[in-house]
Image (spheres, rainbow, N blue to C red):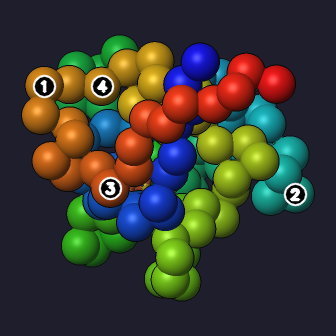
């Protein structure tokens, strides 16, 4: 078996592009933050350019708004982060992703 070992470099949270948020994910994040779903959507999301889904807002430098400035990098909504974040790079990635991501797939003993 292999398991992905993330180095917490935060590079994937700084890449340009959308971090898609479903309605259920918005509900979970809002609950985690202690605010209502409409407030979360108003304050922390935008419509994606294709107008098909909501996306998390970015900071001025393009990084995700929920990326902390800590080293190593930390997601401020880690327990409820969107599936898009959870699934990279094990369930989705793109050609050349290894050049940008400091993590590696490592063999495990399967236990
Ligand atoms: S929600 Fe968290 S894991 Fe996802 S891009 Fe933002 S900071 Fe990174
Ligand atoms: S770019 Fe790779 S190693 Fe860096 S935080 Fe994202 S998944 Fe982890």
User: Which residue is at 50% across, 83% downward?
Assistant: 71
User: Which residue is at 29% across, 50% downward?
Assistant: 101
Q: Which one is nearer the viewer's eye here, 19 or 5?
A: 5
Image position of 69 with respect to 63: above or below: below
Mark 3 vs mark 1: give the one in front: 3
Task: Compute the Cα span from label 2 to label 4.
Answer: 32 Å
Would residue 21 be seen by someone viewing this image from the given angle? no
Q: Residue furthest front?
A: 109
Mark 3 vs mark 2: give the one in front: 3
User: Which residue is at 46% across, 18% downward?
Assistant: 91
Number of numbered markers: 4
Figure quadrant of the C terminus = top right
According to the image, label 1 marks what residue?
95
Callout 2 touching callout 1 (CB < 8 Å): no
Mark 2 vs mark 1: give the one in front: 1
According to the image, label 4 marks what residue?
93
Q: Secondary structure at mark 3?
A: loop
Assess disc 4: are there few (<14), some (14-19) or many (≥20) residues with their C-alpha within 10 Å of its C-alpha: few
Task: Compute the Cα span from label 3 to label 1.
Answer: 15 Å
Task: Compute the Cα span from label 3 to label 4.
Answer: 14 Å
Task: Compute the Cα span from label 4 to label 1.
Answer: 7 Å
According to the image, label 3 marks what residue?
102
Q: Position of residue 54 (x, y in %)?
A: 45, 31
The mark nearer the N terminus, 2 or 4, is 2
Assess disc 2: are there few (<14), some (14-19) or many (≥20) residues with their C-alpha within 10 Å of its C-alpha: few
Q: Which one is nearer the viewer's eye here, 94 or 53?
A: 94
The mark nearer the N terminus, 3 or 1, is 1
Task: Compute the Cα span from label 3 to label 2.
Answer: 33 Å
Q: Position of residue 66 (x, y in %)?
A: 54, 63
Ligand 2 closer than 8 Å to label 3 CB: yes
């Amino acid at each position: 078996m292999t398991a992905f070992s993330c180095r917490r470099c935060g590079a994937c949270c700084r890449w340009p592009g959308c971090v898609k948020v479903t309605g259920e994910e918005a509900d979970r994040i809002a609950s985690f933050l202690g605010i209502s779903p409409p407030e979360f959507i108003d304050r922390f999301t935008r419509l994606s350019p294709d107008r098909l889904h909501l996306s998390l807002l970015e900071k001025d430098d393009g990084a995700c708004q929920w990326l902390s400035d800590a080293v190593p990098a930390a997601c401020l909504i880690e327990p409820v982060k969107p599936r898009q974040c959870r699934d990279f790079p094990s369930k989705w990635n793109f050609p050349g992703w290894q050049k940008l991501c400091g993590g590696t797939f490592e063999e495990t003993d399967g236990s």
